[in-house]
Image (cartoon, rainbow, N blue to C red):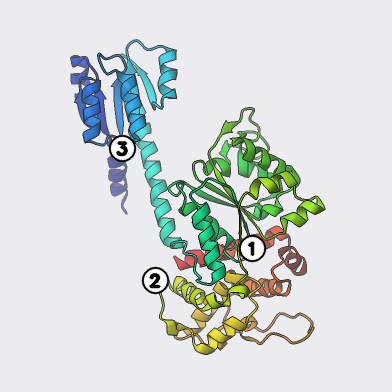
Amino acid sequence: MSSRTDDAGAKGARRLRLLFVDDEAPIRMVMGKELQRIGHDVTVVDGGKAALAALSENAFDAAIVDLRMPEIDGWAVIEHIKKSGVETDVIISTGHGGMDDAIRAIRLGAYDFLRKPYKIVEIDSVLNRVAEKRTLANRALALESELQTVRGKTDLIGESPAMGRVKKLVERIAPTDSSVLILGDTGTGKELVARSVHEYSQRSKMPFVAVNCGALPENLVESELFGHKKGAFTGADTPRKGLIEVANGGTLFLDELGELDKGMQVKLLRFLESGEVRRVGENDAFTVDVRVVCATNRNLEDMVAEGTFREDLFFRVNTFEIRLPALRERKDDIPALARFLAARHLKRKSVPDEILSPETIEVLRAHEWSGNVRELANAIEHAVILSDGKTIQPEDLPTSVSRRPAAGNKPFEISNFSFPMTLREIEMEVILQTMDKFRGDKPKTADELGIALKTLYNKLNQHQSLDQAKAG
Ligand SMILES: Nc1ncnc2c1ncn2[C@@H]1O[C@H](COP(=O)(O)OP(=O)(O)OP(=O)(O)O)[C@@H](O)[C@H]1O
């Protein structure tokens, strides 16, 4: 796109639909012309009554409203706008107003306050800020819908009774504001279920923010979650919003909750009980409206008994529990899931049933799937590449899947790979096979591989993001 088009776009985005309300005729005349001259579409009316009528007819980006007017005054206009839920920013203008009026107007939800006589540059600057705010909001909406296309709808695939129970629970709990604890082994779809809870809730148009507590650097957990003030610590060069604040109005998904240390557990509990956030380095707390959904593959009750997880936090997050079945407990879902994952990888809406040969289905059903649906997704990606879009045969699957389960207590060894594979695929294969060995236990897997637990989380996450980006 050329920069001229960009400029044109930016200019277009700055053009606002304005409602100008004032009972003094000379001001109406001057401002009507001036606002048009600086590039806006203006409707000029002479009082509150006409303003309400105009608002019921048309949508406006902003209304510039005189406070003191006979009959219906500016206060009534702000109240009407706020109550009716239209997205019109109100800019109050008055010849008499003092600080009290300004404070009252802002409390009522006015965007800004101008004292007459104001210069055109002043109103221009306020309107530019309104336009910027609108562009940002639109950009966020556009990104959200783009993301939706990349990620696809968060369909929970599976018609098995176990999955049916999960879907029913999600439908029941989503519209409430209750916190939810999702339990299940790695790769069983905990994040997917959290997204569904969000999408079926009244918060669905607001942000869904996923945080992997296990992957946050230990010294930064608090500032990542709660934000920080400029200069709060070395490296905090600018003030920063925390992820809880970013989720305001929406849902915060705390994955791997069991990985939070006890200090953070106290802070999280305080937030959950008060709804208040205090950025690192700031004195004052402020209230946010966030629904919290947590997930873990650890046994939190055991952790409570061991003293590594706070009992009060456990009770606070465990209001409602959704337990996800392991893939091996719902083998009937495997063919549908495999086809869904193949279609996702091929960026198609669906694939024909014949994409899986009967032998392949048999092999898939016989496998242990310690890495659950994530492991299945990796295996299918591998197979789709090797089969070149044709029917997937058992030999197209990674050897860890196609090979018959080892008999007895054979020592663990990483099985042969079917090349060509990228280094990243080999790494993932080793991780998954090791996870298989430890039945999905991440701390043990990390230990065996000689990497930090956080590195393991990061690698699993990176792999997943790449996978999803590719699927887009
Ligand atoms: N029921 C399902 N239907 C469709 N796709 C699924 C389902 N369950 C899981 N997946 C897919 O499997 C992969 C792993 O799912 P997800 O990240 O939700 O698992 P998780 O339990 O949160 O994993 P971890 O505990 O490792 O964070 C994702 O690509 C997801 O889209």
Q: In which quarter of the image is the N terminus?
A: bottom left
Q: Mark 3 points at which residue?
A: 14
Q: Nearer the viewer, residue 322 or 20?
A: 322
x 57%, y 39%: residue: 240
Q: Is residue 398 visible?
A: no
- First reached walking from the N terminus: tag 3 or tag 2: 3
The type of residue carrying mark 1 is Gly
Q: Residue 184 carries which label?
A: 1
User: Dot 1 lies on which element?
Assistant: loop
Q: Can residue 142 be seen in this view?
A: yes
Residue found farthest to the right: 306
The number of numbered discs placed on residues in the rendered structure image is 3
- First reached walking from the N terminus: tag 1 or tag 3: 3
- First reached walking from the N terminus: tag 1 or tag 2: 1
Q: Name the residue under label 2.
A: 349
Q: Which of 116 and 376 is in front in this view?
A: 376
* 339 w.r.t. 288: above or below: below
Residues under labels 1 and 3: Cα distance?
Answer: 49 Å
User: Dot 3 lies on which element?
Assistant: helix
Name the image quarter holding residue 417. bottom right
Q: Where is residue 139 in the image (x, y as percent from the top left)?
A: 39, 47
Q: Is mark 1 within 8 Å of ligand 1?
A: yes
Residues under labels 1 and 2: Cα distance?
Answer: 28 Å
Camera-nearest label, 1 or 3: 1
